[in-house]
Image (cartoon, grey):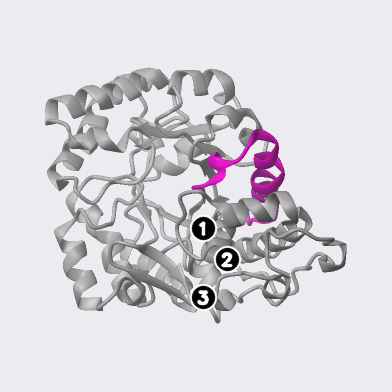
Amino acid sequence: MELGTAGNTSGLMLKPLILSKAQPKLPSSRMATSLQNDRLLRALLRQPVDRTPVWLMRQAGRYLPEYRATRARAGCFLALCQTPELACEVTLQPLERFPLDAAILFSDILTIPDAMGLGLSFSEGEGPRFARPLRTATDIARLGVPDPETELRYVIDAVRVIRRELAGRVPLIGFAGSPWTLATYMVEGSASKDYARIKGLLYEQPELLHQLLDVTAQAVTLYLNAQIAAGAQAVMLFDTWGGILTPRAYREFSLAYMTQIVAGLIREAEGRPVPIILFTKGGGAWLEEIANSGCDAVGVDWTTDLSDARRRIGARVALQGNLDPAALYASPERIRQQAAQVLADYGAGSGHVFNLGHGIQPGVDPERVRVLVEAIQQFSIPYHAPLSPANLR
């Protein structure tokens, strides 16, 4: 039966899959390196910091000439992701330019569907595409949970290499796509403007969509735990397309599975907590429910007022965000003004990680990024009570 077509789906349901793969072993104490800068981790746990930490979504990317040079050497985007040494090189590039407070693993959210056998490729100007998208109930029933140490070994090895090369300079953030966001690509086969196939599946065959989301949630949980075991010191779930759902559908088909993942994640490694960040683009209406997921921090995009977000959930979780990425096309003075406004919107105290409301766009001048990062360093200090350097690493 074609996905999203009419018919009785009761015979298509499979029993929920049970995780049978062994959970990854945590790093030994010998691997642990004392962090020289742990502002990010402290802020995500709403602990005192001396200034607001800053990192940026897509801080390693096409706006950097050194990234474009490394990608050219790799030959293609997938080869760049699948070569741990090159993924490490790209991860570290923005840290060599800017005084950022975290590194984020360079990879792609679609590594899991690719490992499930869907055949991922990238076309210049067209984005990701799957050679074998999910079109039938049989396609979904055939899916298995990839073993991160085999099918996704290149990602886990990249985490290990990056941790080694960082040598405690800043924390490393691991990440994955949310089950709903992964499912949109797996069913549509590529990026979509109307999400006709995945929404058709949601409304016509919801049990079948739950089957897909369940196996994907299991895969994401194993994948993130493997990243933590390899050295990721915080992890983030990107729910890029959760905002296209109705409130009821968001709770059932997106947030429920992210909550399931949060409950299954390793929460302590190397003697310290591993913070979890949830980010739903366009999710401002559901902040309270996202905060109830068990996460430590909620990402906020630029369509939500940060002061309102803090009023609503700031007593329970940290907040991350939320400058409009397009502000980086403005003049340096305007960028400084916008940065100062975001800091003022959040106000005094810890629990804020400065970021964009989504990723850096390819046409941004790297010097504008420098202006932004240095502005956050300068302007955020008065929002934090004086702390003894001995209390900060």
Categorize mark 1 by other alpha carbons within 10 Å: few (<14), some (14-19), many (20+).
many
Residue occupied by mark 3: 152
Tell me which amino acid carries mark 2. Answer: Tyr
Percent position (x, y) of residue 155?
Answer: 45, 71
* Dominant SS in magenta: helix
Question: Which residue appears at 39% of the width and 32% of the height?
Answer: 322
Q: Which residues are magenta?
A: 240-267
Q: Quadrant of residue 167?
A: bottom left
In reply to whether residue 241 is colored magenta, the answer given is: yes
Q: Relative to 344, is 102 above or below?
A: below
Percent position (x, y) of residue 375?
Answer: 21, 30
Question: Which residue appears at 84% of the width and 67% of the height?
Answer: 15
Measured in 3D between alpha carbons, the distance from the residue under mark 3 to the one under mark 2, in whole angstroms, is 8 Å
Measured in 3D between alpha carbons, the distance from the residue under mark 1 to the one under mark 2, in whole angstroms, is 8 Å
Q: Quadrant of residue 56?
A: top left
Residue occupied by mark 2: 223
Tell me which amino acid carries mark 1. Answer: Ala
Q: Residue furthest right?
A: 11
Q: Residue furthest front?
A: 6
Residue occupied by mark 1: 176
Residue 283's disc number? none
Tell me which label, 1 or 3, sits earlier in the chain. 3
Of helix, strand and loop, which one carries label 3?
loop
